[in-house]
Amino acid sequence: TFVDVEEFGTAGVFWFNPTETFVDVEEVNGDKKELRTHWMSESGVIDIFLLPGSNPQSLYQQYAHLTGRVALPPMFSLG
């Protein structure tokens, strides 16, 4: 999952591939700070979900809709 938060909105990418995946993140030198990413999976089908949103909360709501919410742990494990 890759998330970018800017003044004008939030964008996310959910790369769904169960095989081993490598992500290279490179900072590009220039007038404005910019990151370039290169995603590579060993095999399998590539499913990419683009998650646009006006803020991070709306993006993570979409992400939770795709993947499901995490269940709370049992009370005894919370101390």
Image (cartoon, rainbow, N blue to C red):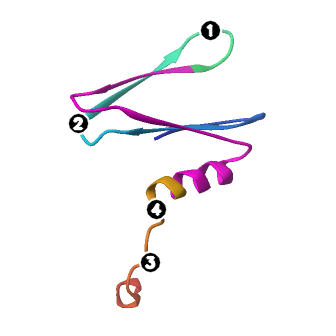
- Give 40 or 75, whichever is nearer the viewer: 40
- Per the image, label 4 sits on a secondary structure element best described as loop
Query: Which residue has dot 1 on it?
Result: 30
Give the residues in magenta. Answer: 35-64
Q: Residue furthest toward the right? A: 8
Mark 2–mark 4 distance (CA, rounded to whole Å): 22 Å
Query: Which residue has dot 3 on it?
Result: 72
Dot 4, how many residues are within 10 Å of its Cα: few (below 14), some (14-19), or many (20+)? few
Mark 2–mark 1 distance (CA, rounded to whole Å): 32 Å
Residue 4 position in % (x across, y down): 60, 35
- The quadrant the C terminus occupies is bottom left
73 left or right of 19 in image: right
- Give 31 or 9, whichever is nearer the viewer: 9
In which quadrant of the rendered view does residue 25 lie? top left
In which quadrant of the rendered view does residue 24 lie? top left
Asked whether residue 76 is drawn in magenta, I would say no
Q: Amino acid at mark 4?
A: Gly
- Give 79 or 60, whichever is nearer the viewer: 60
- Per the image, label 1 sits on a secondary structure element best described as loop
Above or below — where is 78 with respect to 13?
below
Of label 2 and label 3, which has the lower sequence position?
2
Asked whether residue 46 is drawn in magenta, I would say yes
Query: Which residue has dot 4 on it?
Result: 68
Please give the name of the residue rendered at 49% of the width and 53% of the height, measured from the top-left corner: 66
Of label 2 and label 4, which has the lower sequence position?
2
Mark 1 or mark 3, whichever is nearer to me: 3
Dot 1, how many residues are within 10 Å of its Cα: few (below 14), some (14-19), or many (20+)? few
59 left or right of 43 in image: right
Mark 4 or mark 3, whichever is nearer to me: 4
* Residue 20: mark in rendering: 2
